[in-house]
Amino acid sequence: MRSILPILSLSAVLAPVQALYFYIDGTSPKCFFEELPKDTLVVGHYTAEEYDNDKQMWSKHDGLNIFISVDEVFDNDHRVVSQKGSSAGRFTFSAADSGDHKICFTPSSTSGGSGWLSALHPMGGIKLTLDLAIGETSAIESTDKGKINDIVQKVKDLNGRLQDIRREQVFQREREAEFRDQSETTNARVVRWTMVQLVVLGITCAWQLSHLRSFFIKQKLT
């Protein structure tokens, strides 16, 4: 048995950011239709609660799951979303073309509680709260904006660190070039000083040889 919201399109009663809740009978799917323009982004947040007869209240638990499906009615019910989630989560899709989209929610529970059977509760065993954001301007909600702002801040911090690293690399290259110039200058001075020493040593040797030659000639003559 398939359950559909009473001949109602959400866009007829809700603003671009759509929030509502409804009840689901046991494991019967609850569906509604939404006419969307082409390339429209849809982001949905949902929370499912099961009725607890003992506590006489709606509550969430880990054994409650929701299967979400989105079909393109205009394209022979082509399925664009098939997602199984926990009792709370989100889903998103983009309309590939203009037309009606059927959005369905099918619950499943492992609680084994009596509240799971709709016959024991006049409104059904599951209460599902749905918040839809339709369109690019409304798709990014405050929490998503906060996450994006955090990412942007992290990117800015990374860019700042990269700039610091680049400046450090430039500084190191400048110091390396300065050190290389000093080394080359020092090596050139050492080579010149060595050449001067060799010249002086050569002149000294020549002078000593000339002096010794004159000395020996004088000794021979005497």
Image (spheres, rainbow, N blue to C red):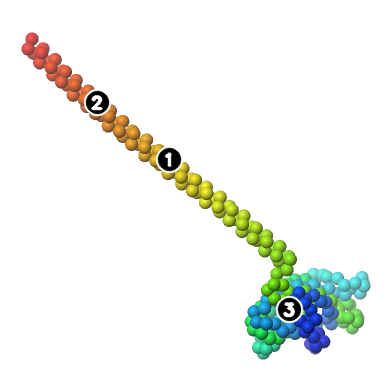
| Residue bearing the label numbered 1 | 179
Q: Which residue is at the front of the view, 49 or 43? A: 43
Q: Residues within 10 Å of mark 3 (few under 14, many from 20)?
A: many
Give the quarter of the figure containing the N terminus. Answer: bottom right
Q: What amino acid is labelled 2 in the image?
A: Leu
Mark closer to the chain start, 2 or 3? 3
Residue closest to the far top: 222
Q: Do the residues labelled 2 and 1 touch (CB within 8 Å)?
A: no
In depth, the one of 126 and 175 nearer the eye is 175
Q: Which amino acid does label 3 sit on?
A: Ile
- Relative to 117, is 44 on the left or the right? left
Visible in this render: residue 117? no
Mark 1 lies on a secondary structure that is: helix
Residue at 21% x, 25% y is 203
- Residue 202 in percent (x, y) is at 22, 27
The residue positioned 49% from the left and 48% from the top of the image is 170
Q: Where is residue 70 shown, x and y percent of the image?
A: 71, 81
Q: Which of 25 and 177 is in front in this view?
A: 177
Q: Residue 68 carries which label?
A: 3
